[in-house]
Image (cartoon, grey):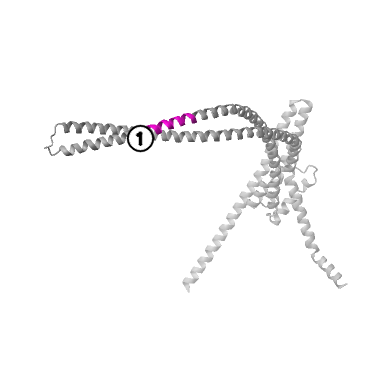
Amino acid sequence: MKFLIKYIAILILFAPILIINKAVANTYENIEEIFLADDQIIYEATISDLEPKLKPLQTIYNDSELNYNTINDEYNTLLTESESLSTSINSEESAYESLVTSINQLSSELDDLNSSQQLLEEDLGNYIQIFSVLGPEDAEYADYEERIQQAELDINSLSLSIDQVGEALSESNLEADAILLSINNLLSSQEILNEDIAVAETSLIAALESLNLAADELKALVTEINLAESILSTETTEVQNQLRSLDEEQLDALNRSLKNIYAKKDRILLISSDDLSQIIDNGYNKKQINDLVKAYEVEQKFLSKGNKLLTKAVEKDNDKFLELAQKAFDNADKQKSKFLEKIDKEEAKKEKKLAKAQKKADKKAADAKKKADKKQNKD
């Protein structure tokens, strides 16, 4: 029994707080609904237009993907064969290049040996010519005799080396010719295979183009859907956060200004989170908030009238209604601007009042300082 009495007492104590919190929550919910009404309509219209297109595009994409994968498998099989053939060709070409390098080295070595032999033969001829005019009694006789003998030995040695290098060069050339023949046979096989690959590649490119086209169309549609969801989600988050950034006076003023809109069936205003930012950033008072809502309210009134006239113009096929609709749209901008100008005028008054208060505060502070300085000097 004591617990029950205590529980009832707690309920009685906190009941006003609970009622207030619920009322504030309802206020947030009502205002949020007004701010998001136009965004919700745009979102629903967008989704209802886009979603029926999603399934057919997905089917086209799946079929294109299956076709591409089948052709791609066949193409890859041919590529594997080509790679194996290319490996063989590369191996043969590598062996040929090594042989060509060896042949070039042997040719260079043979040229060097022949040049050396030619030089030695020239030296030998010079030695013999000089030696022929010398006698045993000459001091240089023995030296040139030795030179002639050494040159002959060197020439014989070079001749042997030339024969060995020439034989190695000949064998290398024969081996190179055999490798070239093998490479040519492999290249012929590869040429036939390349023709098959080219045909498969053409089919693969066409299949890939179809797949990419289907993917692009599907991606574009999904992007549009995601964008519509993102826009609504972002605006919802912005509105919710900014509503909770309003002070109590601003929230109450906004709620009261929207009372007329709550009662209407369509409850549509082209008002957004940007307007809440203006209220918060500029510290709008009750009058400015009321003028802001009125601006959008009168705008919606004329826009609605203009849209009805447009519908009538189509139904009646009468340009007269088009002219009237345009006037209604012009009035929407004109009447909205009038209320927005009131907000600017009120802002100017606030700034003037603030400047006046600041001036008064500065003067008061200056007087206080002057009085304090005077007292200090007296002391």
Q: Is residue 2 left or right of residue 155?
A: right
Check disc 1 and report its element: helix, strand or loop.
Answer: helix
| Start-end of magenta stretch | 164-179
Is any atom of residue 1 visible in this view? yes
Residue found at x 49% / y 68%: 373
The relative height of residue 294 versus residue 166 in the rendered view (above or below) is below
In which quarter of the view is residue 152 placed?
Answer: top left
Q: Residue furthest front?
A: 136
Is any atom of residue 212 visible in this view? no
In which quarter of the view is residue 18 placed?
Answer: bottom right
| Mark 1: amino acid | Glu
Residue found at x 55% / y 33%: 86
Q: Position of residue 78 (x, y in %)?
A: 62, 32
Closer to the camera in the image, 113 or 54: 113
For the N terminus, the image quarter is: bottom right
Q: Which residue is mark 1?
A: 109
The relative height of residue 376 versus residue 272 in the rendered view (above or below) is below
In which quarter of the view is residue 334 placed?
Answer: top right
